[in-house]
Image: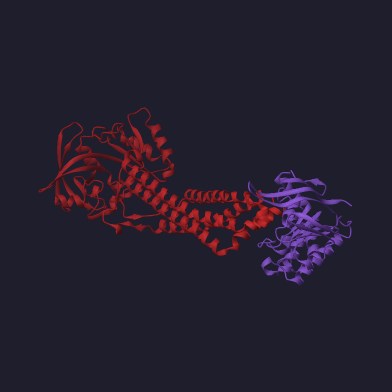
Chain colours: A purple, B red
Amino acid sequence: MTAIVKLERVCKDYGQGDVVVHAVRDVSLEIQQGTFAAVAGPSGSGKTTMLNIISGLDRLTSGRVFVDGQEISSRSDSWLSRIRRERIGFVFQAFNLLPVLTAFENAEYVLMLQGVAVAERRRRVMAMLERVGLASLADRFPRELSGGQQQRVAVARAMVPEPALILADEPTANLDSQTGASLLDLMLELNREKGTTFLFSSHDPSVLGRARRLIRLADGRVVADESPDLPPRA
Amino acid sequence: MRALCKTSWRSILRNARRTTITVSSISFALAISVFFVSFTDGGAATTTNFAVRMQAGHITLQHPAYQDAPAIDLVVPGADALRRRLQVTRGVETTKLLVLGQGVARSSSETAGVAVLGVEPSVEAKTSLLARKIVAGSYLEDGSEGTAVIGRVLAERLKLEVGRKLVLSSNSATGELVEELLRIRGIFATGADDVDGYLVQVPLGFAQRFYGLRPDQVTQIGIVVRDSRQRDGIRAEAARMVAGSPIAVLPWEKVIPDLAAHLRVDGSTNLVLMGILLFLSLFTVFNTIQMSVLERTREFAMLLALGTPPWRLRLQVVLEGAMLALLGCVVGLLLGGLAGYWLQVHGVDVSKFGKGQSISGVPIDRVFGRVSADRLVSFGTFVFVATIAASAHCVRRISKIVVAEVLR
């Protein structure tokens, strides 16, 4: 299987001089295509930093990162922006949607950036909204949607461009447990149907239990990497 | 681009109150500026119109040395023939033959230095507003030799009434001392003491004989034009007619330099004040756009994370500023234009603000506004461009967004 994400001895430090925080320390791992993986750990363990490094939103201090076969470590900002636009989808913890755009317009946003024709955008967006159960709410603005519905629109937006990888940083943190579970179920179904790789972070055990691969971080290091597809760590 | 415009439009409507305040600020400042400039432009036009019609027209033909040292022997020869040619020039409303000299007016009790202006009564009655300012008696008529109209202030000083006589003394063109008796036919009151206390108007023929000039000699030929925008063309035509002869063809600004300077300074001062007003209102715009960018830092960070090119976000903010400016300009120009138009039609009676309102000796009692398309366009353009500039300055913040930190 192809590795969608590959980290080689990645380190990320913040600060300088006497005050240096080692957010990520010497992390090496591979995430295969089609994986539904979670990054777990307490606050400050490096979960968000690792996701930011993989997406190119943060620069690493040392090491190398490969996304979809391409090294991204030393690329320009504009190149990274293009990769995120074309190959990576995002679901954020909060403030996912543009408040001045409808659910449909939010979902089609990245396709619009990619220059996809209007008719094609409409077809793909409506199909995805249908899939996430929100086709009837396509013309609603985010303020008219519940938190769970907004996150579903965010998932639709992430899925519609058919990216290689979807990164979700604490996607259920602002949702109640039932809604959060429902969102995870949706993501899992999309993972199975489309084969899209999902990598999300969380500290909620009920959420983490749904992941097929669980990468545990502590103090910036991988302390556990559990998956039925991987051999146990020595 | 359509999507960008849609997003920008909805973004400015997001905070309707702030948008309303900003648009109101722009439109209020613009409306006031347009109104006041229409007032000053109209005032200048009214003043100029009064001055040129009461004096030597929009264009004056006179001896080249006359402007620096007016003397009765510095004349325009062949005035009648020249005048006939000028009269048929396209754009000329009328021409005036004038003899302007100095003298001393003496009544039975008092003496006063005066300016004596010889005019054609029938032409002057149609051209000069002074003819409508008669408060006692009547204005001059063609053939009313031996009569004069004087200002109320002069009449009071000399203790003269309609029907009474004054003795006019001066030096003729040949240097001889001359004296004539004149009967007061009418008394005028323009409201400007410079005019009412100094000017004596007499028929042209009387003035020519009094100063020893021939019938075809005058000190000035005045040309009154129909449309001031045609003035330069008419002046050039007049200059061609007199090429090679000792006759200068001058615009009114050269003939009445004090008035021209005053209007220039007045106009410039008003423009500066209006510019300051508009500039201050633009701070509101700047603040609005700055705040809206700051408030949306996280939103912009999210969009950048999705792969939005930074230029797109910058363009969105600039478009928002442009939309605010456009709204403000449309409303402001409409309000200011309507108010200026009202002023243009109805005018303002400035005599209520004090007796004897005048500008450089030119009396004014009612000011009519003047709304012009170039003023509207120039003000609107200034505000629009300045708002775009303010927006462009604010968008620098977008480039400084560190996405990872903001989204954390």
A141 to the left or right of B320: right
x, y percent for residue B399: 63, 49
B136 to the left or right of B28: left
x, y percent for residue A143: 66, 67
- Outermost residue on the top side: it is B244
| Residue drawn at (42%, 52%) of the image | B37
Let me know if residue B21 appears in the view: yes
Q: Nearer the viewer, residue B47 or B35?
A: B35
Let me know if residue B326 appears in the view: no
* Among the 4 quarters of the image, the one containing residue B60: top left
x, y percent for residue B209: 20, 37
Total of numbered circles in the picture? 0
Q: Nearer the viewer, residue B10 or A6?
A: A6
Q: Nearer the viewer, residue B227 or A212?
A: A212
- Outermost residue on the left side: it is B108
Image quarter where the C terminus of chain B lies is bottom right
x, y percent for residue B284: 50, 56
A112 to the left or right of B273: right
Q: Nearer the viewer, residue A15 or B239?
A: A15
* Among the 4 quarters of the image, the one containing residue B301: bottom right
